Amino acid sequence: MSKIELENINKYFGPNHVLKDVNLTIEDGDFMTLLGPSGCGKTTTLRIVAGLEHPDTGTIRLDGKGIVNASDAYFQPPSKRDLNLVFQSYALWPHLTVFKNVAFGLSIKKVPREEIRDRVEQVLERMQILQFRDRYPAELSGGQQQRVAIARAIVTAPKTLLLDEPLSNLDAKLRLDMRSEIKRLHQELGTTIIYVTHDQIEALTMSTKVAVFFEGSLVQVDSPLEIYRNPATLEVADFIGNPRINFVDAQARFTMEKIEVTSCLGSWTYKAEDFTETGFPQNEDFKCILGIRPEQLLLRDSPGEQSTEVTIYTAQPAGSETLVQVQVGDNLILIKELGNRAYEADEKVYMEVDPDSVNIFNEKTGRLLK
Ligand code: ATP
């Protein structure tokens, strides 16, 4: 068992309010990624869980037992928390070889020598660093040291693993390999993982849940797919997805149980019950913003029932897919298309979108309406 609960966590650095009433539950076996732009408070949250930083208010429970209670000034020391930590700066022991760095945790647990050798070699192999087993940290590149740090943390098969940008120093190919190793490891061991990254692809591909932070506030906690399909706010929609989501201005109008949404892409009618907010004045336009993912748009050579005529701005072929930018009124809209049909600049084509796949945000609050 390893469940971590954060309740009403606030943290100030001087006048800077860096965590604003954060409430987050990490269930046993979750792979929870803390995601958000630089400076939003991810690392501070992880350091508070690890006991390296104290919150100004709030409580933290590990498996139901209080380990932090700011109002009683109770803080369990880091060494008592049974959490394994890997930071961006790897903090390897410089006087120990790679093998000994990784073996250390098993030696102090008095694991038999042969088992230590087998387990360390196995994990070094998974991290693709077995050939460096007799080198010292100073004789390794940053990316190699980073993998030694991960190996050291996982060799003991910990119940809980805290990882802060553990792949930041790796090249693209190694990062892909390590992503799959960490994901596989999570599935094999059932370890509860808290993983900090600003890389949304890492978050979407590895995690069971993602917690999205902006400026110290936790904005959404959901499965990666839910965050991608139904981002809670405009800023989450904008942060998640590569290439970026398209935003298009629109007007919505409530009439009886229906909502009519009009934009340069046409007019669509929705049922009021599909919307998260109701209570808008009847028969009055209010501003909203449509969020449409580039792969949700289709281009056709001839008009269909629901299509809009658009003008090609640019087309960027990228192997099996093509990124096409089209102009509709004042908007430039990006479409990700499978295949590599050639397009000419200024060519006229027809664009289709399924209205059900479109996200609609309240322009005033930025919150998801549908
Ligand atoms: P990054 O992705 O760049 O690591 P982050 O989301 O992990 O960013 P934090 O490191 O948690 O962000 O920092 C949150 C805010 O707190 C930032 O504005 C940062 O400058 C500030 N901060 C962090 N540590 C300290 C400190 N020890 N003293 C003062 N301010 C700090």
Image: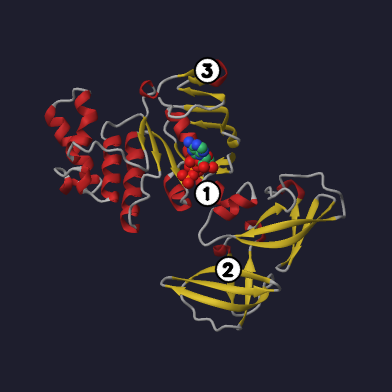
Which residue corresponds to the image point at 56% horizontal and 42% vertical from the top-left? 213
Q: Nearer the viewer, mark 1 or mark 3?
A: 3
Q: Earlier in the sequence, mark 1 or mark 3?
A: 1
Is residue 209 in view from this perspective? no
Residue 351 is tagged as none
**On screen, residue 364 above or below 100:** below
Instruction: Tell me where residue 177 appears, x and y as whole percent.
Output: 31, 52
Q: Check if mark 1's residue and mark 3's residue have beta carbons within 8 Å.
A: no
Quadrant location of the N terminus in the rendered image: top left
Residue labelled 1 has its Cβ within 8 Å of some atom of ligand 1? yes
Which residue corresponds to the image point at 78% horizontal and 54% vertical from the top-left? 259
Q: Residues within 10 Å of mark 1 (few under 14, many from 20)?
A: some
Q: Earlier in the sequence, mark 3 or mark 2?
A: 3
Residue situated in front as seen by the camera: 284 or 247: 247
Residue 73 is tagged as 3
Identify residue type, mark 2: Leu
Q: Is residue 157 left or right of residue 315?
A: left
Identify residue type, mark 1: Pro
Instruction: Tell me where residue 53 appears, x and y as whole percent.
Output: 47, 29
Question: Which residue position is annotated with label 2?
Answer: 334
Residue 37 is tagged as 1
**On screen, residue 116 above or below 362:** above
As measured in the structure, the alpha-carbon distance from the residue carrying label 1 to the one carrying label 2 is 23 Å
